[in-house]
Image (cartoon, grey):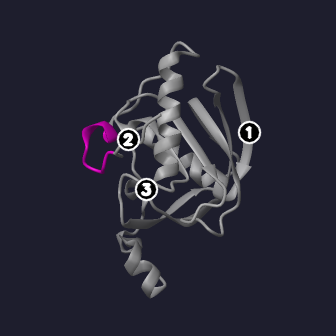
Amino acid sequence: MAVIKALRMGHPILGQVAASVDPLPSRELELLVDDLWDTMRALDGAGLAAPQVGVSLRVVVFEVADNPRYPDAETVPPTVLVNPHIEPLGERMESGWEACLSIPGMCGRVPRFQHIRYRGFSAEGESIEREVSGFHARVVQHECDHLNGLLYPQRIPELRDFGFSEEIEAWGS
């Protein structure tokens, strides 16, 4: 459909809590999902949330397979998740480096729950429920944060763990 320019940190939509999608399914939702996939893949992203393209609705897409930005990452199946809910499974957190299409050129070390259950709906209105861990869990938490008006730097406990991706890669932080 269309590749849309991702909004960048500082845009007010990125700080808003997104609205639930109702009704499911709809032609408008189908078009939005097509645009999210096109935009995410064009930018080599692992995921994308509707607010990042200026649509304040609770919709995310994610997938990791042969992605040059994440060459060593585990495969994450292509998923459309509408009106998601995340439940941590245990207290164990793991810190890992994250980047975001709305904060180009930067990355930061973010603690996330290692094991989660997520629920929601497909664009067709079918129920989705999965238990995941590792990188898959990190991607889902990152994308769903966008639906609550949060960007990953807001979760970084130490600002020394935030900087330009090129510098961090070059100096092995």
- Disc 2 on helix, strand or loop? loop
Q: What span is colored magenta in the figure?
A: 7-15
Mark 3 or mark 1: name the one nearer the start of the chain: 3
Height in image: 126 above or below 95?
A: above
**Where is mark 1, residue-wise?**
130
Give the residue furthest to the front.
1
Question: Residue 165: x and y, percent?
Answer: 41, 72
Q: Residue at x 52, y 17 (%)?
A: 27
Determine if residue 25 is in view: yes
Residue farthest toward the bottom in the current orientation of the protein:
171
The residue closer to the viewer here, 41 or 141, is 41
Tell me: 56 left or right of 74: left
Q: Position of residue 134 (x, y in %)?
A: 68, 58
Extreme residue toward the top, this view: 23
Residue behind mark 3: 100
Residue 20 spot, x, y in % from top left: 48, 22
Q: Is 11 included in the stretch rendered in magenta?
A: yes
Name the amino acid, label 1: Arg
Graded by Cα atoms within 10 Å as few (under 14), some (14 to 19) or many (20 or more), the crowding at tag 3 reads many
Distance between mark 1 and mark 2 Cα atoms: 29 Å
